[in-house]
Image (cartoon, rainbow, N blue to C red):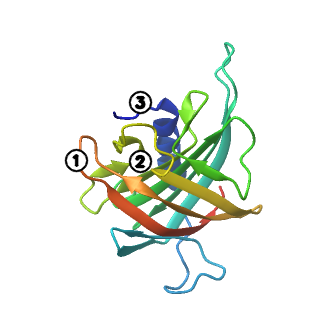
Amino acid sequence: MKKPFNLFFYAIAFLSLITFSFGCKKKDSPGTDSGTYFIKFKVNGAQKEFGYTSGVFTQINLGGGYPTIYTASFQGISSSSTPTVYNMSLNINDLVAIAINKNYKSVIIGSTVAGSLVYMDAVGLVHGSDFVSTGSLGDDDAVIKLTEITTTSVSGTFTGKVASLGAATALTITEGTFRIKKM
């Protein structure tokens, strides 16, 4: 069974793309993490690294008795000139303020998914953890953990599975780490 359409997921992904219009920080020097911004991970064992990054925290309150959703969206792209191709987005939603040392997983909270991954490959094909068919809402389809939040950056880890819509097989995301510039 496919996971339900997730309006918040797409709204946050769009918001992430918009933040790139106002500025990204490129990783200062390849191969060093100290004092730089990056998203690193493996896709089916192949190393990927994006140095243009951005992150945003917000709250969504639709009113009408719906709960406030706290959201965080982080994105890394390969080039600031082509932000809609070859990128990785990490999206977190919660009914309480976003916190460190908490695993945000592919489970429904309120009316949205707590943790989701979206990987766009080099040819522009979108692979999302919300498209993975597990027979149920599998909490291992995406796991995002924030390890540090400062006034200027957010750091953490992530793993999961992503698939393109209707795909028979999923891609495996492992060894994901990030340090993102906070917008």
Of marks 1 and 3, which one's residue comes earlier in the chain? 3
Local packing at callout 1 (Cα closer than 10 Å; few below 14, some 14-19, many 20+) is few
How far apart are labels 3 and 2 at the CA level?
12 Å
Identity, as a three-letter code, of the amino acid under mark 3: Phe
Q: Which residue is the site of mark 1?
A: 168
User: Which quarter of the rendering shows the C terminus?
Assistant: bottom right
Q: Which residue is the site of mark 3?
A: 5
Residue 80 appears anywhere in the view: no
Q: Position of residue 44 (x, y in %)?
A: 33, 68
How far apart are labels 2 and 1 at the CA level?
13 Å
Identity, as a three-letter code, of the amino acid under mark 1: Ala
33 or 98, nearer to the observer? 98
- Name the residue located 36 percent from the left edge and 38 percent from the top edge: 135
Of marks 2 and 1, which one's residue comes earlier in the chain? 2
- Give SS at disc 1: loop
Q: Which residue is the site of mark 2?
A: 129
Q: How many marks?
A: 3
